[in-house]
Amino acid sequence: MIRNAALPAWQAKWIDPELPHDAETRQPASYLRKRFSIAEPDRACLHITCHGLYAAFLNGERVGDYVLAPGTGDYRQRLTVQCYDVTGLLKAGENELTVILGDGWYRGGVGIDGLRNYYGSDLALLCQMELNGSVLLCSDETWEASQSGPIRENDLEIGETYDARMERITDWHGVRVRDFGFENLAPTESVPILEQERFPGRIIQTPNGETVVDFGQNLAGYTELRVTAEAGRKITLWHGETLDENGNFTQSNFEPGDRNQNGGIPQKIEYICRDGLNVYKPSFTIHGFRYARVETDMDLTDARFTAVAVYSRMPQTGFFTCGNADVNRLFQNSLWSMRSNFCDIPTDCPTRERAGWTGDAGVFAPTAVYLMDCYPVLRKWLGECRLAQAENGLIANIAPVNDKRDQIAMMLQGSAGWGDACILVPWALYEAYGDREILEENYDMMCRWLAFCENRARESTRPQNESNPWKEYLADQGFHFGEWCEPDVNNMLAMRKNAMEGAPEVATAYYYRSASLLARIAEILGKTEDAGRFAQIAENAKKAYRFTCTRDGRIESGRQCAYVRPIAFGLLDGEENRQAADALNELVLRNGCHLNTGFLSTPDLCRVLAENGHAETAYRLLLQEECPGWLYEVKQGATTIWETWDGVRPDGTVHDSLNHYSYGAVCGWLFGGVCGIRLEAGRLTVRPCPHPSLEFAEAKWLSPVGEIRSEWRCENGQVLMNIAVPVPAEIILPDGRQYQVKAGVYSYEVSL
């Protein structure tokens, strides 16, 4: 695939391959073909997109390796076109281009509610092949189509039905030209979704007698099967993330609400064999799974099942290992949850919702930039945030939008900590990559969001907060999720309380955070007038926060988040900061070194403690093996990060998604705290925070400025450190010594 290829001067037409049908009925995939002749092959490119998903084949060979093309997005506003170099697939004489279309994000089940036909009920193809710059072939009324191919049903979430006996298609009919226009078309600027790691399956028998394949790793992707069979024999695969408390296959943990009344999300593959060897993998579906239940009357002795991971092309850039095997597994789990959920855009989970929640991306982006080269994926997603932004500046909680857009859905938008991702994510990318363009590209969106927050704060104040002298900067109105998912708090009751009383502590803190960051961004971009105005908003929001949410800078709360957030955001001054950190430390210790932070503040918890004199407690939190704690799920055999701390309870019952990356944000502290690697727009600091509980720690980051390594080992009361930097850097040792160094490798020894 050629990125950033300019769109052609379209001679092609949109063609609809389907005969008239009931829009509510699931349809087979559509197959389209066009034969053409050339004298001699030469440099050729294929520009292609569709309504739905496409897989293109030239003379029987797959065009490119992009799966689930053209990717997702708000198709009404932006539909990307891919360009492929097909020179090597052409031959002299007759050629044939075949394209298969599936439902995908366009008309398949999407989002929280599994809505169908969200963008339309049609499938359609647009393609144009050029040879040496001249149009060789384009989609038009001369093409043929069929719905009599082997893919009988397909849905991105539900699954696929494939009848291998129908692979030789003889029933072809004409196509209809449709006037869909070209205004929403745009060249591809991101990276493709690819098949990546492969995991061979191991067949097991569960206590209730079911045949289940264990692939050993929870992931997003699909199963490839290889089996020899007689024609007509059938295999059904149901995909799930875990086994239940009795060791049997289950999907109960990712079946959301009303979906159960409509058949749920079976994540099911039905395959009907042809005679002989059958090798199959889906074309238009992916699942979130570790296990697959097999239903068949066939002999599976020689059958082979392989799980294929599918996610955007993002080379791993962060590598970490230490002396604690469970922490190493935690790091790998975070990587796998990122891989599982960065499929064209960052999503919350690969099973029930697959939604581009802003809050998830906002809390994880500072960690994501260490782990993998995710710049193109996050940049594309920020473009979807811009498309989803309302006229008044409100940022939708999910981008691209995929809900009903009814009155209730519209009321539950613009949450603090979620909408603020439109500033937090570009800032995280800027700090890691040092690219001003990401700030410039999103500056208007950021300003409009802050204006929305400003108007919301200024327009009204709840009666209990009227005495605040800076009430016009107190954010106590509007819908907010709040801290969300605190371990011992009922989410629904907390949200109801927020609706009745507002969430001034969370919302005003984020108002301050976004305004202060935007002031820095404006300064970087040379917008000094804006910078001054945003800095003043931040200062006033800070005063409003301190008046309502603290007592002269002192915090009185039994919740850890109430301390983490103001410390992390800089809402306290000097001695107040120290007292808050000490109080936070005491809360954690009194809670048996268990966290009780939620979704928003957990990523900052260990860092805030360690940077304020409580590294011992930070490490005890990291190594906590009881629930809630990061290593609890590792001890339960997790291979990804769970949505909730007790996704598998001690009695074995399972609930909620077992593949959410958000709480994996602690791995940012492994790089930035434990090993101390911090890059701020080209300014590199290495400040390790060693502790004997890990024995040793090694981090390597293939950063945008080059390879950075930070290693330390505790031996005989000493810490031996080796640090390699590719550019000038500041190295700060645990004993306070500071060095300004050039690119090179440095060794130090410090007493514990």
Image (cartoon, rainbow, N blue to C red):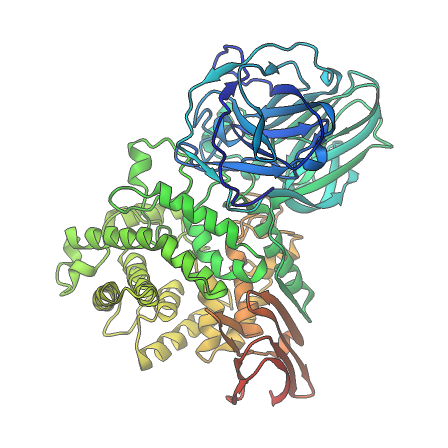
Q: Position of residue 506 (x, y in %)?
A: 32, 58
Q: Position of residue 419 (x, y in %)?
A: 35, 50
Q: In the depicted view, which residue is nearer to us: 42 or 530?
A: 42
Q: In the depicted view, which residue is nearer to us: 456 or 172?
A: 172
Give residue 362's quadrant in the image: bottom left
Query: Which residue is located at x 48 percent, y 71 percent?
Result: 682
Q: Is residue 285 left or right of residue 389?
A: right
Residue 166 in sight from this viewpoint: yes
Q: In the depicted view, which residue is nearer to us: 543 or 633?
A: 543
Q: Is residue 294 left or right of residue 594?
A: right
Identify whether 175 is placed above or below 162.
above
Query: Which residue is located at x 57 percent, y 73 percent?
Result: 674
Query: Which residue is located at x 54 percent, y 51 percent?
Result: 646
Query: Which residue is located at x 65 percent, y 13 percent?
Result: 148
Identify whether 320 is placed above or below 233.
below
Q: Which quarter of the figure is the C terminus placed in?
A: bottom right
Q: Is residue 247 left or right of residue 408?
A: right
Q: Is residue 420 left or right of residue 461?
A: right
Identify whether 261 is placed above or below 572.
above
